Image (cartoon, rainbow, N blue to C red):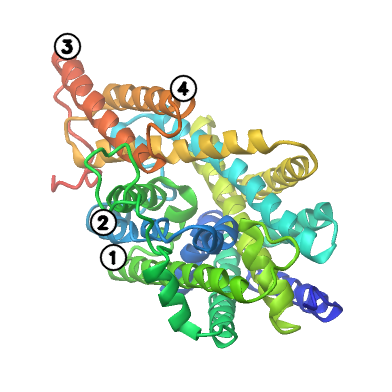
């Protein structure tokens, strides 16, 4: 049990310096306007695919997935299989729309419904969601790393924030994509090595893990059914479907993901991007869950390390069991996962603010130079604000506030996806219907989240409920409005799944 050594500290510092250097290297060409927000067209599809993977795999996932199977079962693993639902639907219906429209941001709402207000509302919700997510993503891994390394949590937060701000400020999306690719690759290789190392040092090897899964109910517990006809209760089925719609919400309405789709209008490349991302995500989730069950077996055979709380069990194993040097690299990979998500968040918030809000509310058209400057200032201001919020979280007794905000963030994209589906899958929907659907879905979801006992409605049902409410309210409201106003307008070309 050597813990975190000077060698590991040196590797951590060298790694972070290398990432910063890589970000600045890809930023050496000055980017303006669309290039700053969409890249310059030279980023290969496989780089963008790993970038999407690195963005969706936040350090919260890194720390909690192994902890889930260590302390419990593989029930949450099935949530990753939601990609098998999300990816085909996104490829079949939404990517062709985004490709044909060649949109700069996710908020095609203005194009579909002819409403600047809806686009601005969607952008504001995304920005609130992203700022909260960035703060939590800085706070959690820095708390874990601080406890394992002895380094000040505030210092770790500041360093992480500054590095992410520098390469998202200077190089725009191209810089972010390449640094994401590097960090996603390190994470994939490092975590796979950790699993192999664990299997080699486990009495019984892979067989011991399989024994725990099959005879000790570590795969699924007795009270975790494959299917439950009550969709408000947890089951494998509702987890796959609910997580599928959640993931589709990210693919379709979350600016940080859609921004990557805008790097190309080639549908074949977009499809490859999605399939590769899905494969990587399911692979890494399986590795994490194998590690978690492996650690359950390992710590029955060996002494538990210090700081071995559920969400810290994998990080503790990395610090106290892996070889010197590898520890530094893998802890750097956790830090990297946070930085990857953070830099993505900064660039996507800058893009959303500039193109969805500022450009829409400005009385005169913004030049590319002006757009770039606004984007850079927004990424700087939001980055500093997220650092401050993360430090407040780290230094205050704010567990309940964290839980409340985390719950709120989960609602935001769920509500948005309902409006997107209403727009893409129906011709009859109009601005009035979309606004009614948005308000109704928001009211229902806030009521369920904060006024209904948590064990009455599974969180995996949220996106399904939101979509159903949006359609049930939005379609009749649109029809009534059309009857009353004599409105026979049709959607703009290429904004629905139907051929015009």
State how far apart marks 4 and 1 are (Cα): 43 Å
x and y percentages locating residue 116 in the rendered image = 41, 30
* Residue placed under numbered mark 4 in the picture: 451
Mark 4 Cα within 10 Å, few/some/many (few <14, many 20+)? few
Q: Could you say whether the residue bearing mark 1 is in a helix, strand or loop?
A: helix
Viewer can see residue 44: no
State how far apart marks 4 and 2 are (Cα): 39 Å
Count all numbered tags in the image, as a single digit: 4
Q: Residue at x 13, y 48 (%)?
A: 499
State how far apart marks 4 and 3 are (Cα): 36 Å
x and y percentages locating residue 297 in the rendered image = 54, 73
* Residue placed under numbered mark 1 in the picture: 267
Q: Residue at x 29, y 21 (%)?
A: 432
Reading the chain from its start, which is encountered first: label 4 or label 3? 4
Reading the chain from its start, which is encountered first: label 3 or label 2? 2
Q: Is residue 486 above or below residue 342?
A: above
Whether tag 3 and tag 1 are in contact, CB under 8 A, the answer is: no
Left or right: residue 153 compared with residue 49: right
Whether tag 4 and tag 1 are in contact, CB under 8 A, the answer is: no
Q: Could you say whether the residue bearing mark 4 is in a helix, strand or loop?
A: helix
* Residue placed under numbered mark 2 in the picture: 96
User: For residue 455, which quarter of the picture?
Assistant: top left
Q: Is residue 160 above or below residue 112?
A: below
Q: Is residue 374 above or below residue 56?
A: above
* Residue placed under numbered mark 3 in the picture: 484
Reading the chain from its start, which is encountered first: label 4 or label 2? 2
Viewer can see residue 195: yes
Q: Residue at x 37, y 24 (%)?
A: 444
User: For residue 112, which quarter of the picture?
Assistant: top left
Left or right: residue 213 compared with residue 347: left
């Amino acid at each position: 049990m050597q813990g975190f050594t000077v060698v590991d500290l040196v590797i951590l510092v060298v790694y972070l310096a290398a990432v910063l250097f890589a970000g600045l290297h890809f930023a050496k060409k000055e980017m303006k306007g669309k290039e700053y927000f969409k890249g310059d067209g030279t980023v290969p599809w496989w780089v963008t695919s790993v970038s999407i993977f690195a963005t969706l795999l936040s350090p919260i996932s890194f720390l909690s997935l192994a902890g889930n199977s260590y302390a419990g079962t593989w029930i949450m693993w099935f949530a990753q299989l939601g990609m098998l639902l999300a990816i085909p639907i996104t490829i079949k219906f939404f990517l062709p729309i985004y490709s044909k429209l060649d949109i700069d941001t996710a908020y095609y709402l203005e194009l579909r419904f002819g409403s600047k207000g809806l686009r601005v509302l969607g952008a504001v919700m995304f920005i609130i969601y992203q700022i909260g997510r960035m703060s939590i993503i800085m706070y959690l891994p820095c708390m874990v790393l601080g406890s394992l390394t002895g380094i000040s949590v505030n210092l770790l937060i500041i360093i992480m924030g500054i590095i992410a701000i520098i390469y998202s400020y200077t190089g725009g999306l191209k810089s972010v994509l390449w640094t994401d690719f590097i960090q996603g690759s390190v994470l994939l290789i490092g975590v796979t090595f950790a699993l192999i190392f664990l299997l080699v040092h486990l009495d019984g090897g892979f067989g011991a893990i399989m024994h725990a899964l099959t005879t000790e109910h570590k795969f699924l517990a007795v009270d975790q059914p494959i299917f439950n006809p009550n969709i408000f209760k947890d089951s494998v089925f509702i987890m796959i479907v609910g997580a599928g719609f959640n993931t589709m919400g990210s693919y379709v309405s979350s600016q940080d993901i859609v921004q990557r789709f805008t790097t190309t209008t080639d549908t074949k490349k977009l499809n490859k991007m999605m399939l590769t991302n899905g494969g990587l995500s399911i692979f890494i989730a399986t590795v994490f869950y194998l590690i978690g069950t492996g650690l359950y077996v390992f710590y029955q055979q060996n002494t538990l390390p210090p700081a071995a709380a559920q969400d810290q069990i994998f990080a503790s194993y990395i610090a106290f069991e892996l070889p010197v040097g590898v520890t530094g690299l893998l802890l750097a990979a956790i830090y990297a996962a946070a930085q990857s998500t953070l830099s993505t968040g900064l660039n996507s918030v800058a893009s959303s603010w500039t193109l969805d809000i500022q450009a829409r509310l400005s009385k005169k058209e913004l030049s590319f130079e002006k757009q770039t400057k606004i984007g850079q200032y927004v990424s700087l201001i939001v980055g500093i604000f997220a650092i401050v919020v993360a430090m407040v979280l780290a230094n205050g007794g704010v567990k309940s506030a964290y839980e409340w905000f985390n719950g709120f963030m989960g609602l935001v994209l769920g509500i948005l996806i309902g409006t997107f589906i209403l727009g893409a899958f129906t011709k009859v929907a109009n601005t009035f219907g979309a606004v009614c659907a948005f308000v109704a879905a928001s009211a229902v979801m806030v009521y369920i989240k904060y006024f209904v006992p948590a064990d009455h409605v599974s969180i995996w049902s949220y996106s399904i409920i939101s979509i159903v409410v949006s359609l049930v309210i939005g379609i009749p409201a649109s029809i009534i409005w059309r009857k009353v106003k004599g409105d026979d307008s049709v959607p703009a070309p290429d904004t629905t799944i139907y051929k015009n």
